[in-house]
Amino acid sequence: MARNGPFPCSQRGQPTDVETTNGTRVSTLFRELARARGARAFHPRGRWFAGELTTLSPGALPLPEGTRPVTVRMSKGAGVPGAGADVLGLAVRVPAGDGRGGPWDLALSASGIGWLTRMVPLPARGWGRARYGSIVPYRSGGRLVWLLAVCAGDDPIAPASLETLCRRVAERPPLLVLHEGTAWDGWRPVARLVLTARTRGPDPRPCFDPMRNRPAEVEMAPRGFAALRERAYHGSRLGRWSVDSPSE
């Protein structure tokens, strides 16, 4: 994938000197961390899967209609080895279509589901027990909207081992339900995601970046934090490109 994302960043004025300085520091920190790890600064090790995303009903976010093939990466946030509990991650690349000029990257991490805890990354002991949230909301149509993916049927898919997950996908493809939630409303199912098979990842493997790869009418909020998060992704990419990393 090209290093420059297909969608513009949020439209606002020129950054202040403080914002520029903070952004540079964040970029440098994540670059050095990625360089030291020889992988992503966070979620350094993962596994790739082919999947299918099916929209169930229209929501606040412009998910594609019908069923689409997607690329999925499941990962451990801190890179805890083996079956140790970690902030588990679910990244989904929705391909271009429905008028979008590029892909849409959904980057979700294990979190809470309450009004406050949905913004807090939380470790989980099993892939099926985690609640995969966007952590920060999207701003769409004047509303703040969070995404949350949960395994259907209270499927534990435990422990939190990447190899356990791979075996499970081969034996019985797991189903996750994607929900939308606002600051004041409950969660509403809008799509389902099935992991159909493990893959070795596309070549070249995509750099998931939810800040750049998103529909033009959707932005991440709040804007100041989103700008710093974009610099973090940028720094992590630079650190990874500086080493020959075999990580998934």
Image (cartoon, helix red, strand yellow):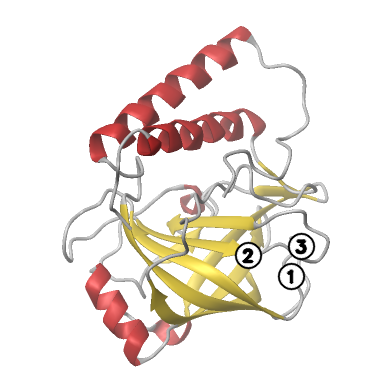
As drawn, which residue projects farthest toward the bottom? 171
Mark 3 = which residue?
Answer: 62
Count residues near mark 3 (Cα–Cα under 10 Å), then give few for <14, some for 14-19, many for 20+: some
**Amino acid beneath label 2:** Val
Q: Is residue 142 left or right of residue 196?
A: right
- Secondary structure of the residue carrying tag 1 is loop
Asked if labels 3 and 2 touch by Cβ distance under 8 angstroms, the answer is no
Query: Who's the residue at 18% across and 66% down the image?
Result: 83
Residue ID at (34%, 87%):
170
- State the mark number for residue 100: none
Whether residues under marks 1 and 2 lie with C-beta atoms below 8 angstroms apart, the answer is yes
**Mark in front: 3 vs 1:** 1
Question: In the picture provided, is 91 more to the left or to the right than 214?
Answer: left
Q: Position of residue 74 (x, y in %)?
A: 39, 64
Q: Closest to the observer: 72 or 54?
A: 72
Cα–Cα gap, marks 3 and 1: 6 Å
Residue 62 horizontal/vertical position (percent)? 76, 62
Locate residue 146: give its quadrant: bottom right
Residue 28 placement: quadrant: top left
Residue 159 in sight here: no
Q: Which residue is mark 2?
A: 94
